[in-house]
Image (cartoon, rainbow, N blue to C red):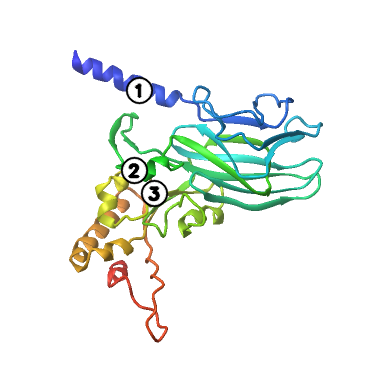
Amino acid sequence: MMKNWMKFLTLFLGSFLSAQQTTFKFDFGGNRIENGFIPISSNSKFDKKIGYGFMDISGLKSVDNGGNALTGDFISSDKPFYFSVAIPEGNYDIQLKLGDSKGTSETTVRVENRRLMLNDVKTKQGEITEKQITVHVKDSIIRNQNGIEIGIVKLKPRERKYLHWDNLLTIEFNDKAPKVCSVIIQPNKNAKTIFITGDSTVVDAQYEPWASWGQMLPYFFVPNEVVIANYAESGEALKAFEDRHRIDKIWNKIKPGDYLFIQFGHNDQKYGNSTKSGYRKRLKEWILKAKQLGAIPVLVTSMNRRVFDKNNKIVNTLDDFPRCNA
């Protein structure tokens, strides 16, 4: 009886997860709505029941210039604004129409924890431009092939406030004159995923002015073809990353042809020379595991700290840990 009940529960939950909506078409602006699109106005505050909306509607403006129902109106603000959608983890292509049919615009787009996607997109008078981005959405649950929970990433308390662990896709519109006409979201099953592991020098930093090379990386890759999945976290060492099951989450998601970027050393060095042998051993294990799963491991040498001696020469602050990548 118990086996039959568990089998039913597995099938039910798997069906529920697969049935959750993954494609959305949003028309931003006034009262005129493009056929097949969901209307989004300046009053569309996020609602858990419907699963989408702006996190804060203060300062939002709906502008309708007339003409085309999709591109004749837009949402804008004098400050950054955030649009969120409840969506299952995975990779998604997002099509954005930006601009003003009777004016100019200037928009920067970031996702989740300030992950840079588009920088300073300017449109001329009356111009509407279409841009594509590809985004990796994740949660902390480790699932089997049927979608059933088999483990969880042990998040630090501060991470529970992060926009990339909240079971939502969040898009930030920023810059001098951000103007958004429409947003279309659909799954991307074919993009190669670059999984990033590391510490604060790689993490998607939550607050200004903190930043890393990891959260800038998506800007430099071709959307639809490559997506960046940044799993780095501040303060992590190689062993801690493993102990918190962050790497288990990646092993659960990575597929043949994907990449695994590995950059550690800063925090490992703090624990002293006794960690070196374990560090090398664990690196080799990760490399072997990635290859077994058909992925391509890439060792990234950690950047040195900005420490100089009395002769203004750089001081090695990472000991011999960078040599472990050799």
Q: Residue placed at 57% from the left, 45% from the top?
A: 133
Q: Is 103 positioned to the left or the right of 209 in the image?
A: right
Residue to which mark 3 is pinned:
231
Residue to which mark 2 is pinned:
157
Q: Is 321 positioned to the left or the right of 205 in the image?
A: left
- Find residue 297 and report its horizontal and vertical position in percent: 36, 57
Q: Which of the two residues, 8 or 62, is positioned nearer the viewer here?
A: 62
- Residue 234 placement: quadrant: bottom left
Can you say whether 291 is above or below 7 in the image? below
The residue mark sitting in front, 1 or 2, is 2
Circle number at residue 170: none
The residue mark sitting in front, 1 or 3, is 3
Amino acid marked by disc 3: Tyr
Amino acid marked by disc 2: Pro
Confirm whether residue 254 shows in the render: no
Q: Which of the two residues, 5 or 65, is positioned nearer the viewer here?
A: 65
Residue to which mark 1 is pinned:
13
Q: Quadrant of the C terminus?
A: bottom left
- Label located before the other in sequence (1 or 3): 1
Mark 3 Cα shell of 10 Å, populated few (<14), some (14-19), many (≥20): many
Amino acid marked by disc 1: Leu
Label 1: element kind: helix
- Residue 99 placement: quadrant: top right
Mark 2 Cα shell of 10 Å, populated few (<14), some (14-19), many (≥20): few
The residue mark sitting in front, 3 or 2, is 2
Q: Residue placed at 52% from the left, 39% from the top?
A: 170
Label 3: element kind: loop
- Find residue 283 and report its horizontal and vertical position in percent: 27, 59
Label 2: element kind: helix
Distance between the alpha carbons at the discs numbered 3 and 2: 16 Å
Look at the numbered discs 1 and 3 and tell me whether their residues touch, using CB distance below 8 Å.
no
